[in-house]
């Protein structure tokens, strides 16, 4: 049997198998990486040379390193995937992260841990690699369902990981969660290696000159000329800032809220706070995303941004964990709408066939925001105190509300059709 005959004999729903495997791998991979977030700011303080910076700044550096480096590396890996195959890039990301996370368990100094985190950002890019693989394998008419399923895997992993990581660190110390994360990433890589059969055939003559900065800049410039795209990227940048600002200060803030007798449980409570936020963000993304198809992306974005701002302001004044958990749950639901609406707008403002470049640039913008947010939040916390960060996050959402209300293209055609229908009905 020839290769072509073998391909023709593939069942028509083979892409569903690929989607299920990659979604599961995404849940394992992102859940594993999120597993270390609750205790990273506490872990780095136990290492040698950890006193050369304030705890807040150290926490910001260790959280920010991967996304900042990833913002530069993601476009390169995306182009490399088109040249040499998407499955290879998924395996590179998963197995590379597995090795680096295992090494973090044995870091002796704060600088070594930060360097390993930066290396993780360069070699990883799991989410972008998974999206490219699935987008290349599934039918065009099922793209929304496929990428939406990946988001469920992403948020499912992020929801479970922090709570599990906090509990492991609390009961077994800081080393075991890193090794558990490494094992989860390796398992995800094995699932993809064995279960996914990629149909995409890379070009016979792969060209490295397609990866040069000039070629990338040309493709980005064409995308940025589209109406509304620059505004959406600004919204995505602000959203990244708002969502990641609490990462470095959550464990420290939880520790400050707890009575001294409960201080040993700070990692577990910090994991619970991040988990609650991730769960409600998932729900908000699904529910408000579904409503935005009929109510309009712009309306849902403005509503979600206002709701998030109103939920973050009182968090600066909470006095116990239960108040923080309730407000984080409400704010997370609103953040889901502020996350999903701009992502859908990008597809509407750009042409078919540009999805890879559009969302590759989106990943760079989001990664840069995800990296700068913890650093900015750490500086704010060290100067003005931990509670000031919640007020600043509320300002981010108010800025998102202002930009969305004043600079997003308004759905004029829909409004005209509605007015015409009413006039005709009258």
Image (cartoon, rainbow, N blue to C red):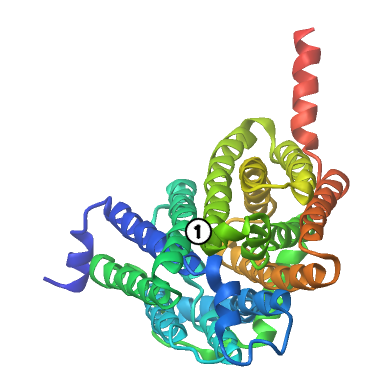
Q: Position of residue 337 (x, y in %)?
A: 65, 43
**How crowded is the residue under tag 1: few (<14 C-alpha within 10 Å), some, or many (20+)?**
many
User: Which residue is at the front of the view, 353 or 345?
Assistant: 345
Quadrant where the image shows the N terminus: bottom left
Give the residue at x 70% y 63%: 245
Quarter of the image for the C terminus: give it: top right
Give SS at disc 1.
helix
Q: Is residue 215 above or below residue 297?
A: below
Instruction: Write down the residue under mark 1.
Output: 268
The answer to which quarter of the image holds residue 42 is bottom right
Would you say 232 lies left or right of 407 here? Answer: left
User: Hey, which quadrant is residue 101 in on the image?
Assistant: bottom left
Position of 294 relative to 72 (above/below): above
Relative height, residue 345 to residue 271 (above, below): above
Residue 69 lies, with reference to residue 260, above or below; the image says below
Q: Position of residue 344 (x, y in %)?
A: 63, 48
Tell which residue pokes out farthest to the left in this image.
1
Q: Residue at x 73, y 74 (%)?
A: 375
Q: Residue furthest top?
A: 426
At a point 65% along the width and 82% down the height, the residue shown is: 215
Q: Quadrant of residue 247?
A: bottom right
Residue 235, horizontal then vertical, whole percent? 75, 56
Q: Nearer the viewer, residue 41 or 144?
A: 41
Is residue 286 found left or right of 60 in the rendered image? Answer: left
Picture coordinates of residue 176 (x, y %)? Answer: 38, 74
The answer to whether any part of residue 392 appears in the image is: yes
Foreground pick, 6 / 176? 176
Q: How many marks?
A: 1
331 relative position to 376: left or right: left
């Amino acid at each position: 049997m020839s290769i072509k005959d073998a391909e023709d004999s593939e069942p028509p729903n083979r892409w569903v198998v690929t989607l299920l495997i990659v979604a599961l791998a995404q849940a394992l991979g992102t859940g594993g990486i999120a597993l270390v977030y609750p205790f990273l700011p506490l872990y780095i303080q136990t290492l040698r040379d950890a006193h050369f910076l304030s705890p807040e700044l150290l926490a910001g550096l260790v959280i920010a390193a991967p996304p900042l480096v990833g913002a530069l590396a993601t476009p390169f890996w995306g182009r490399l995937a088109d040249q040499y195959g998407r499955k290879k890039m998924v395996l590179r990301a998963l197995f590379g992260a597995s090795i680096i996370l295992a090494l973090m368990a044995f870091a002796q100094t704060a600088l070594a841990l930060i360097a390993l985190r930066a290396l993780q950002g360069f070699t990883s890019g799991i989410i972008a690699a998974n999206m490219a693989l699935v987008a290349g394998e599934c039918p065009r008419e099922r793209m929304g369902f496929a990428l939406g399923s990946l988001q469920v895997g992403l948020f499912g992993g992020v929801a479970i990981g922090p709570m599990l990581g906090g509990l492991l660190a609390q009961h077994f110390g800081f080393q075991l969660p890193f090794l558990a994360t490494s094992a989860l990433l390796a398992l995800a890589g094995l699932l993809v290696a064995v279960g996914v059969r990629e149909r995409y055939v890379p070009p016979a003559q792969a060209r490295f000159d397609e990866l040069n900065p000039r070629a990338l800049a040309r493709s980005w410039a064409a995308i940025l000329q589209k109406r509304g795209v620059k505004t959406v990227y600004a919204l995505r940048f602000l959203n990244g800032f708002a969502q990641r600002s609490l990462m470095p200060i959550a464990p420290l803030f939880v520790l400050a809220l707890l009575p001294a007798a409960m201080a040993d449980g700070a990692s577990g409570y910090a994991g619970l706070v991040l988990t609650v936020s991730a769960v409600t963000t998932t729900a908000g993304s699904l529910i408000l995303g579904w409503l935005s198809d009929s109510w309009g992306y712009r309306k849902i974005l403005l509503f979600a941004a206002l709701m998030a701002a109103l939920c973050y302001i009182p968090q600066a004044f909470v006095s116990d964990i239960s108040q923080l958990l309730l407000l984080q749950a409400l704010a997370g639901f609103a953040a889901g709408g502020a996350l999903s609406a701009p992502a859908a707008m990008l597809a509407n403002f750009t042409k078919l066939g540009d999805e890879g470049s559009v969302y590759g640039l989106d990943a760079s913008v989001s990664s840069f925001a995800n990296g700068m947010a913890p650093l900015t939040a750490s500086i704010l916390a060290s100067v003005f105190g931990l509670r000031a960060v919640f007020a600043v996050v509320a300002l981010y959402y108010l800025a998102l509300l202002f930009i969305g209300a004043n600079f997003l293209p308004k759905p004029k055609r829909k409004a005209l059709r509605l007015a015409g229908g009413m006039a005709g009905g009258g």
